[in-house]
Each structure stands twice: as structure tokens, then as C-alpha cells.
Amino acid sequence: MSFFLADNIISSLGFNTRETFSSLLSGEIGIKQIDNKEYYPEPFPASMIDENRLNVEFKRVAEKYSNTSDHTKLEKMLIVSIDEALSSTNVNIFSTKTAIILSTTKGNINLLASNEKDLFETDRVLLWKLGDVIRDFFENPNQTIVISNACISGVLAINTAAMYINSGLYDNVVVTGGDIVSRFVVSGFMSFLSLSPTACKPFDEKRDGLSLGEAAATIILGYSTDDEQKLVFKGGASANDANHISGPSRNGEGSYIAIKKAIIEAKISTTDIDHISAHGTATPYNDEMENIAIDRHNLCAAPVNSIKGYLGHTLGAAGIVETAILLEEMRQNTILKTAGFNNLGVSKPIFVTDRIIKKDLKCCLKMASGFGGSNAALIITKTES
């Protein structure tokens, strides 16, 4: 059995999970107008971290590990996140029985820019190299496992970690993920005409596109022997709807299958699910597809929220960021409202949260979807104390 041992979030709203969650509870929105021509010729909304704070935190961690090497912004984010998560556990990062899984979609893509391409060796832009940099910093003996499957990467990485632990291959797995806002990423989404001019509005009738965000997050899974109340990975699955290179299936087939397989693996019933953390990008097709998948599982009464109205879409980090937030919701028995949501704008009568809800959360579902028709889901349950 895989337990959630620790987690961390580095975001525009905080540099640990509790700080970020506190900001979310207060309704703070991390998405701001960015007016910087290095990213895009025109202003655009995005959620970006405090680089000055990042540099201070990274210097502290680098001194702790006696590491004097130069690191990119993303590498600093990931390293600070991993260190903070490790600090609250007894996990031995130097052990052969501890693995690192890295989730990212673009990695150090900013190093392709003309003003940054000469700052590091040319292979630093490659995802496997990013994994090596993280492994080398922490002196972990195992090759970093890199998972890059569009925007389900984070949830898929958590599912993979649990599989490794449950099979006995590793005792602990450090799942970390991150992506940054860059000219490449902004230009790409602008070319799809998929960015909202304001902070995104998941599931709302006036939603008009997604918002970008940058973040790093870490979740550590492993065995647990203490008697305290625990959060447990119960099941996870993925499925591809084979619909379109970017657009999801209109009937939610891939998401429906992923949820169904996760429920079967978890050995639960849909009636056990107390809360759903949706992918919720605020694009017309994604939200409608998820809404249909939820309805097909007769889960319309379960409170559903999306975090992207606060932090934007953090790409390869999203599944880890949002799972860490879901874990904190379960610890505090508190469901966050969906920022930007006012009136239901999808076809099925799902229960999208427009307020904070206090509820005993014993079993929750996390959903994820991404380009290429990819979908993933995982189930978390709470043991009795």
C-alpha cells in the first residue's frame, strides 16, 4: 500500500503547501497581467512565482547540500520543492530504494531563447538532462524517471510511483514536477487562440479559455508504520480517447474509462467519492468533456472544483500541484471554491463549488486531461486515526 508521506508546492501564492492553501482559502488569485516583451509582445494573464524569493530559498538549499553549480530557474524550483518535502520525512534520498520521478512538459525550454541559449550546455534543454541535474544535486543513486505526457504528466507520475512501491521495486518515490512560463509556451497557446484575456473561469458559462501558470510541486509516496491518520493512494489509471491531436473526445470517453479503471483498482463504489478535483482548464471543450464523464459515472452530486482559476494551468506540474491541494483539503475537511465560477456553463448538472464547503472527506477523485486525448485519474482515501 502506498501512503502520501509529504508534499510541497512552489507557486505564485506560496512556497509550501500550507502557505499556498491558506492563500487559496482567502480567495487570493495568483494570476496577474504580465507585461514583459521577453515572454510575449502584448500583455497576457499568467501566474508566476517570486524569483527573488526563489533565489533566496535556493541559496539556502544549495549551501545545505554544498552545491555551487549554476542552475536554471526551473531547476531551482524543483530542488527547493523536493528539499522542503523531504525535510518533513525520514526518507533517505541517498538510498537505492528511493526513486525520483520527474513530471514536466517543456522542461528548460527557455534555454532555446537567443538570450539564454549560451548560459548552459546545449543538452540542458533536454528532459533527461533535467532529470540528471536533479538526481545529481541530491546524490540519488537511481536514474531519474521522466514522465512527459502532456498535461496528465503529474497524475500519471503519481500513479507510476504507487505502482513501483506496490510492486516492491522501491520503498519511497519522490514525485516532482514543474514547468515555467516562457515565450515558447505563451506563443504556442496564443497560436491555438486558447488563452483567456483575464483570469480563467472553469465550468462557467462565460469561460473563454485558459490561463497559464508556473509552479513546481513534490509529493513523496512510500510505506508508513505510524498509527496516525493517513492518506492512502488507492487506485489510478490512464486512458486515451484517440480523438484529436489537441481536442478531447466530445463524449468524455477517455476520461470516463480512466475514472472507471481507477475506481475498480481502488475497490470502491462511485457512491464513496466525497469530492472531485477536476482538471478544469476553462476551455469550452475540456470542461464539457469532464462534465460528461462525471455525469456518466453518476457523480453529479459530488462537489467538483478546479484550482486553475487561482494558479493557472501549470502544465506538467498541474497534476502534482492539484493533488497536493487535494491532500490538504482532505486533511482540513475543506473543499475550496472554484475561482472564476458563477453560473454553470456545461450541459450536465454537476455540483461545481461556488463557495468553501466544510465536509468530512474520506475518499476523493483527481482527474487530469491533456493534448493527444490523454486522460488520467487517481483515488485517495483517508484511514481512521
Image (spheres, rainbow, N blue to C red):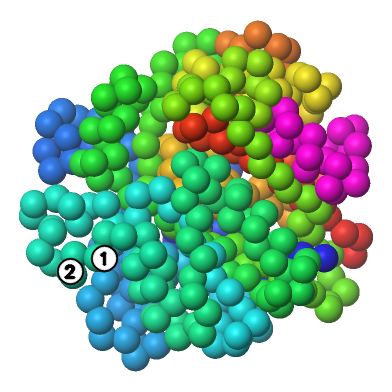
Left or right of residue 311: residue 173: right
The amino acid type found where label 1 is placed reads Arg
Pointers 1 and 2 in contact (C-beta within 8 Å): yes
- The label number, if any, that marks residue 276 in the structure image: none
Which image quarter holds the C terminus? bottom right
Q: Residue at x 50, y 45 (%)?
A: 149
The span shown in magenta is: 255-277
Which residue is identified by label 2?
120
How many marks are shown on the rendered structure?
Answer: 2
Dividing the picture into quadrants, the one containing residue 47 is top left
Q: Residue at x 24, y 41 (%)?
A: 184
> Is residue 93 found inside the magenta-colored segment of the image?
no
Which image quarter holds the N terminus? bottom right
Magenta-drawn stretch, dominant element (helix, strand or loop): helix
- The label number, if any, that marks residue 124 in the structure image: 1
**Relative image position of residue 122 (x, y in whole percent):** 19, 65
Q: Is residue 42 above or below residue 145?
A: above
- Residue toward you, 121 or 214: 121
Left or right of residue 223: residue 282: left
The answer to whether residue 120 is visible is yes
Q: Assess disc 2: are there few (<14), some (14-19) or many (≥20) residues with their C-alpha within 10 Å of its C-alpha.
A: few
> Most extreme residue toward the bottom, as rendered?
66
**Relative image position of residue 13 (x, y in whole percent):** 43, 50
Between the C-alphas of marks 1 and 2, the distance is 7 Å
Mark 1 residue element: helix
Mark 2 residue element: loop
> Is residue 269 found inside the magenta-colored segment of the image?
yes
The answer to whether residue 305 is visible is no
